[in-house]
Amino acid sequence: MPVNVSASDLVRIGPELLLTVVGAVLMVVEPFTRAKRRLAVVAFLTLLVALRLNFAAAHGEAFSGMITVDDFATYFRALVLIVGILTVLISTNYLKQAGHETGEFWSLMLFSLVGQCLMASANELVLLFIGLECSSIATYILAGYLRDDKRNNEAALKYFLLGSFATAFLLYGVAWIYGITGSTNLSEIRISLLGSPDTTLVTLAIGLMFIGFAFKISAAPFQMWAPDVYQGAPAPVTAFMSAGPKAAAFAMFLRVFLTAFEPAKQSWEPIVWVSALLTMIVGNFAALRQSNIKRMLAYSSIAHAGYVMVAVSAQSDVATAAAMFYLAAYAFMNIGAFAVVTHIARKDERYVEIEDLAGLGARQPLTAGLLTLFLLSLIGIPLTGGFFGKFYIFKAALDANLIWLTVLGLLNSAVAAYYYLRVIVVMYMKDPRETTENLPPLTPGMLVVLTGSALATLFLGIFPSTVLDAAGQAARLVR
């Protein structure tokens, strides 16, 4: 089918075009510049301009309906771009210490964000797949960016092999859906499924696609890659992976399952229900046994994916809005937590054990206080974004009569409190170690990230309606 391109189409993908052009330019000019720090400044300013273009883009379809720019796409594009901005600030000093301050890093990050933006706005399965691959391939390389670090190499290799395997399932499912419905457009697939085609074939196709989605959001039983990759990748990259690609993957998940596959919800609802429960259980109980803080936060990330999947199971506008709100709150509190880990770990990430945080409350009260706030938000303590995120998700689940899933989810949240509080106890109630005695002060960029993430976490906990109303308006457009 021919695709007509107009000026308005190009404006609607303005953020993606800008990120692509600047990413390519950075790779070209990098060998000719000695001031590597300027490349980070260019990437930072590019992301700010892309964020402005995202809000300025007129709503509507582009490229013959392949892309839909609506409140839903605008919300998620803004979220992943903000994650990118915060990651730039975290990464600058880290890369300088590691001796890998090159333009390739910023180019790869921009290319990954291009894919994530496409995942949020695509209305066509093939374009969703292209966006997913753009994001994934760049992120595979970022995970192994420090080429002389064996941990990075192992993380990248595992991520690539397992990710490619999962992508094959997704693409096979797309092929089946095309064979069943004759289209890869989400709206047309929905219309076709309303005609009640063969339920068995549809269920198998949805199951294949679910495997691909579940891998990207690290949902059980396809979460096995996350702990090793999060632990082995550079700390700023881990922060980026845990928030940006995950938010984009959930955007894709929500749009596909609540739009195209909504008529077949009886086929996939039990799958999502069971996976949500397993994801919470695996994530929380495995995190209890971890001594490495990056690995603990990796299992925590798995558990939080389970909470969002509870909202997907509820299948309502309120539940979708709750999932969108929770992903925003999670992005800020998780970026903040990993920013502190990056600061503590220092060069070569020598200090990433939970015990390495001993005495942080005495040595750097501000850093410890901010990390405490992020951990309390991850628990779901009132006056934090994490509290209202869980509150809205479980309320939506109750409204959908998912009583047992709600009860088990709340019990899992109680389990999670143990391993988060354990970190706080180590920071404030154990004698300082040499790991915190010689801790350098926070860099300006790190301070901006930590204070900004903390303010956002508190804002979402005190004034949740501001973001929730925007999420609710966007959610109504998805279904």
Image (spheres, helix red, strand yellow):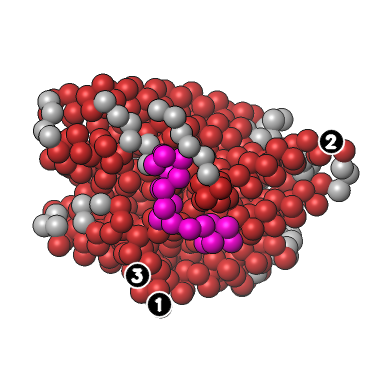
Q: Residue at x 22, y 39 (%)?
A: 190
Asked if residue 61 lies in the magenta stretch, the reply is yes
- Which mark is in front, 3 or 1? 3
Q: Residue at x 86, y 48 (%)?
A: 35
Of 323 and 409, nearer the camera is 323
Q: Is residue 248 above or below residue 417?
A: above
Magenta range: 52-70
Element at label 3: helix
Residue under numbered circle 2? 31
The label shown at residue 463 is: 1
Q: Is residue 70 above or below residue 30?
A: below
Q: Quadrant of the N terminus?
A: top left
Residue under numbered circle 3? 469
Q: CA distance from mark 3 to mark 1?
A: 11 Å
Q: Earlier in the sequence, mark 3 or mark 1?
A: 1
Q: Is residue 463 above or below residue 257?
A: below
Q: Position of residue 303 (x, y in %)?
A: 35, 49
Identify which amino acid the numbered label 1 is placed on.
Answer: Phe
Disc 3 crowd rating (10 Å Cα; few below 14, some 14-19, many 20+) is few
Q: Position of residue 468 (x, y in %)?
A: 35, 68
Q: Position of residue 13 (x, y in %)?
A: 53, 47
Disc 1 crowd rating (10 Å Cα; few below 14, some 14-19, many 20+) is some
Element at label 1: loop
